[in-house]
Amino acid sequence: MPETMSSAKWYVIHTQTGAEAKAKANLISRAESAGMTPLIQQVFIPTEKVSEVKAGKKKISERKFFPGYILVQMELTDESWYLVRNTPGISGFVGSGKKPIPLAENEVNQILRQQEEKTAKPKPKVEFVTGESVRVKEGSFANFNGTIEEINPNRGKLKVLVSIFGRSTPVELEYWQVEKI
């Protein structure tokens, strides 16, 4: 997990969307071959885990917080700036003017904290809204339609009002057991 060092600052670098990992690898490789690892200390792609259901199976995948951007902890010198700017897959630093502006300490800490929280608990890819109509796909109430009464994102569960024998009955279901109508 990245930590902040006193002399190095965090900068945001723009890459091609979908090519963040390749740009990261290129930058690390170029820094090593140029002997600049003391200047370019860490390269970081903020991600979160997302759970989704495909073909009836729950799958956890990673999703980038900021597609098209990577964070770099580095000491800004003419040499390190030039190395980053001329790395394949990197468009340049984010910021106005010629000299890149580092992220504030509180912004970096917020991103790192967000990374830790999102990695610990996978977030469901499908978002539900109270009052929305859904169809139950699995379980005892398969093929029943219902209305979402309550959402518990921390547990990944929904309370759905299902009509059974003409009465609305609350049923607790997991996100993957229902689909939007």
Image: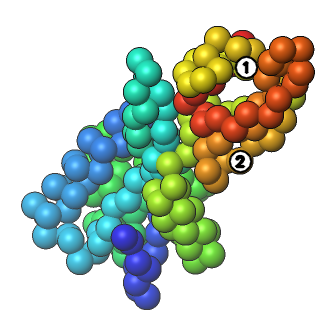
Q: Looking at the image, which residue is at 67% across and 47% down? A: 153
Check the image and report above or below for 150 versus 102: above
Three-letter amino acid code of the residue under disc 1 = Val
Secondary structure beneath label 2: strand
Residue 33 in the image, given as x and y percentages of width and height? 10, 61
Residue displayed at 80% across by 18% down: 164
| Position of residue 46 measured from the top left corner of the image (x, y, whole percent) | 46, 54
Residue 123 position in % (x across, y down): 56, 45
* Residue 3 spot, x, y in % from top left: 41, 78
Answer yes or no: is residue 64 visible: no
Quadrant assignment, res 145: top right
Task: Estimate how packed mark 2 is, as few (under 14), some (14 to 19) or many (20 or more) residues with alpha carbons within 10 Å.
Answer: few
State how far apart marks 1 and 2 are (Cα): 16 Å
Q: What residue do we see at 47% from left, 69% from top?
A: 10
Mark carried by residue 51 = none
Q: Quadrant of residue 16?
A: top left
- Front-most of residues 166 and 8: 166
Of residue 137 and residue 101, the one placed in the foreground of this image is 137
Residue shown at 47%/60% (left/top)?
120
Where is mark 2, residue-wise?
152
Task: Residue type at mark 2: give it.
Answer: Asn
For the N terminus, which image quadrant?
bottom left
Q: Classify mark 1: residues with Cα within 10 Å, few (<14), some (14-19) or many (20+).
A: many
For the residue pair 53 and 114, the one nearer the viewer reads as 53
Provide the residue designation for mark 1: 134
- Residue 2 relative to residue 171: left or right: left
